[in-house]
Amino acid sequence: MTPQTLRARLRGLALVGAATLLLSACASDATETADVSAQADIAAAPETLAAPDDETRAPTRITALDIDETAGVVRVATDRGVYVADLPDADTVARPAAVLGERADDIKAYQRLGARLLISGHPDELGTAGDERLGLWVGDADSGEWAPFALAGEVDFHALTAAGPTAADAIIAAADSVSNTLYFSPDGGESWQKGAVIGATSLAFTADGSALVAVTPVGLKVSSDRGRTFVEPEAAPALQLVATPPVGTKDWRIVGVDSAGALWSSTDGDRWQQFGALASVPAAIALGKSGEVIYVATADGVFASNDGGETLTLMLDLDW
């Protein structure tokens, strides 16, 4: 089947504000996908998925997107767990498989370190209150087995990021939505240090971890001391989401999307260059190993673009 390239018209919903995209779990009616312009569909697609009519409790919100070329899969973190599908061939469109493992947590933050998956948010278990803090859990990307990892019941991370030469040597930063505090781990999540209170909603490290970029309600901030203090770069774009390639990638860059849908790129967090544009802010963005292709998640599906968002090709249908 020929890849579906989306084109011009828009039927759908207005996007909510930048902070709401990341912090709220509000659901919107998803628009029916049509074979029209990519830019119009991305503008029409909300960051949430339509709620099901029955009691199956299908996902209603996308939290994060993970392109795992080593394993040959794409993962979509949602408010009903992590969904997994095979990366499709160039002439096919994949459909999501079952939830990874037996957990269907309301995931607010997600980060992959090699074959380890880190999640945070709210647990979804019988007898468990929906507002309890999951802390940080770790899952096996192959078996789907999950276990508590750190800060159980203490934090509700709404942003996670990592960097390092390998997954085993990774440093991690996380943003707690309850205290608005930045957390930093120098050893892959084994220990944690508290940093500044900035209310970050999206995070990204530079390649060597020397700088940490934070999207906040009052603008873009950068830290050079592992999150203890932050400053605002000159002429910083009003980014809403930031993303980096998988940990261990050599060709590293930070990619962000601003409130108007413009795509920006930086290697140091201070200097930013616009290289493309989307019609609006998607639910999630991701990079692969090469860092050249931009992956975008909306309520309609996961799309790939190798021309700065001008053309979006459907690669994963999110018809739950």
Image (cartoon, rainbow, N blue to C red):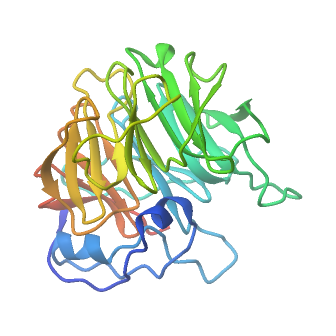
Measured as percent of width and height from the top left, residue 283 is found at: 41, 61
Is residue 107 depicted above or below 225 in this figure? below
Measured as percent of width and height from the top left, residue 48 is found at: 48, 70
Furthest toward the right, the residue is 127
In this rendered view, identify the residue nearer to me: 251 or 105: 251
Residue at x 13% of width, y 61% of height: 311
Is residue 246 depicted above or below 119 in this figure? above
Q: Is residue 108 left or right of residue 211?
A: right
The quadrant holding residue 208 is top left
Residue at x 47% of width, y 25% of height: 114
In this rendered view, identify the residue nearer to me: 304 or 291: 291
Residue at x 43% of width, y 79% of height: 30
Is residue 260 depicted above or below 190 in this figure? below
Number of numbered tags placed on the structure image: 0
Measured as percent of width and height from the top left, residue 121 is found at: 66, 50
Measured as percent of width and height from the top left, residue 124 is found at: 75, 56
Q: Quadrant of the N terminus?
A: bottom left
Is residue 10 depicted above or below 145 in this figure? below
Residue 141, can we see it? no
Residue 161, can we see it? yes
The quadrant holding residue 301 is bottom left
